[in-house]
Image (tube, rainbow, N blue to C red):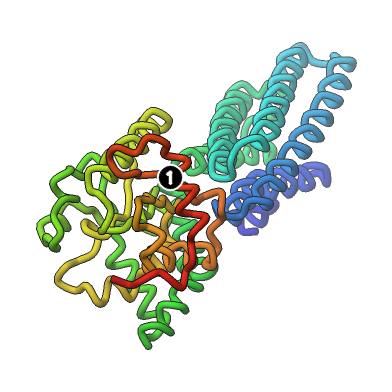
Amino acid sequence: ALVVVLVTAIADAADTLNYASAFYCIGIPGPPLLLLAVLPTDRLVIYGVAVICCGVSLVCGYFIADEAQRHARRKRRPDKADWTAVQYVWVVGFLCVAAVMSSAAGLPPRAALRRMWMSLGAVYLASALIWGYVCVTCVNGMERGSPEHQFFWIATAELFVLGVASSTPSFRQRIHAALLARDGQISSAASVAALLGRNDIDHVKAEAQRKFYGVELSQVRLEDLQQSTPDPALFARAKHARFDEIDWFISHSWHDSPDAKYSALQAARSKFVAANKREPVAWLDKFCIDQTSIADSLMCLPVFLAGCKQLYLFCGPTFLERLWCLLEIFVYLEMGGRVDDVTLVLAPPEGTDDVDAYFEERFARFDVSHATCF
């Protein structure tokens, strides 16, 4: 709204210029603001926004193409051909955006949202270059220093800033973390934790953010999982993180074979590295709980669950018998997590011939009343 007021004040000329100023200055920040309002867990909303952006891009491309054809027919100025070429470049850009947005509908929600952000950033930066070219060359016939010329420079700067912001994942993560911390999953999880621990909700959220840590799985060794006693030195390998920065919350039973879990963990890690070209960051209890204040960390466990992108279940022979593991699944889904974001990784005991049959039999016998805490 502030940008609209400033630009309209500068561009106090023809009514059409004021209309264009309001349209572009509302339209330019509109898509980033729309995407910022979408959280990675809002599956239907993500796909809905992709459809909206696709439709808007097609409509904008049509109107600009129509305007370019009318300008080409006039041919009053020698630079008209250059201006028409610039308009057609915009048309191609809008068609590319529509294609990218439509392709996002076939991806998982987080991947679709990430593609939408990256395409938006690329389009804004490309548009900033085009508008900068128009400002320098004045190919559309505007006079240097005129209100229209000033408007183009302001719009160019706005496109560049929003393009850089849209292309920066940390920017989006900070905004989403702030939204999650104020409402949605984090607040719901904090409410549960507050009821369980008889603490104030704001205190739980603040404490959870302070104690939210993740560890790169390259830092996890087999001997770390083989130790049955807490090791405060492992906490030093974890790094503090913001909500929604940690890829996996790892749920597992300490009664299952460390060797089997480590093998399954490394297999899942390898797939993630191959797909994302980086190490996964996970919340793993032995590394991410401060052993000097275990009670406070456990109080925040529902918030830790809600703050992770996905829940990874490393299911061994005793996983379905541990009430704590089952509670983690329940809390994650009740706090707004989706089944699509829950990954089951089987960790069978050594020597198992038919893994599927082994676990199918255990799932068939599952009864939560038989689960124990310890």
Measured as percent of width and height from the top left, residue 283 is found at 32, 55
Q: Looking at the picture, does residue 180 appear above or below residue 369?
A: above
| Count of number-bearing discs | 1
Residue shown at 54% from the left, 39% from the top: 111
The percent position of residue 241, horizontal first and vertical second, equals 31, 56
Residue 44: percent from left, percent from top = 68, 51
Q: Nearer the viewer, residue 57 or 203?
A: 203
The type of residue carrying mark 1 is Tyr
Nearest to the observer: residue 278 or residue 163: 278
Q: Which residue is painted at 74% across and 46% down in the image?
A: 23
Quarter of the image for the N terminus: give it. bottom right
What residue is drawn where x is 21% and y is 45%? 220
Label 1 element class: helix
Q: In which quarter of the image is residue 304?
A: bottom left
- The residue at which mark 1 appears reads as 358
Mark yes or no: residue 226 visible: yes
Task: Answer with left or right where residue 367 lies relative to residue 231.
Answer: right
Quarter of image, res 351: top left
Q: Name the residue nearer the viewer: 175 or 23.
A: 175
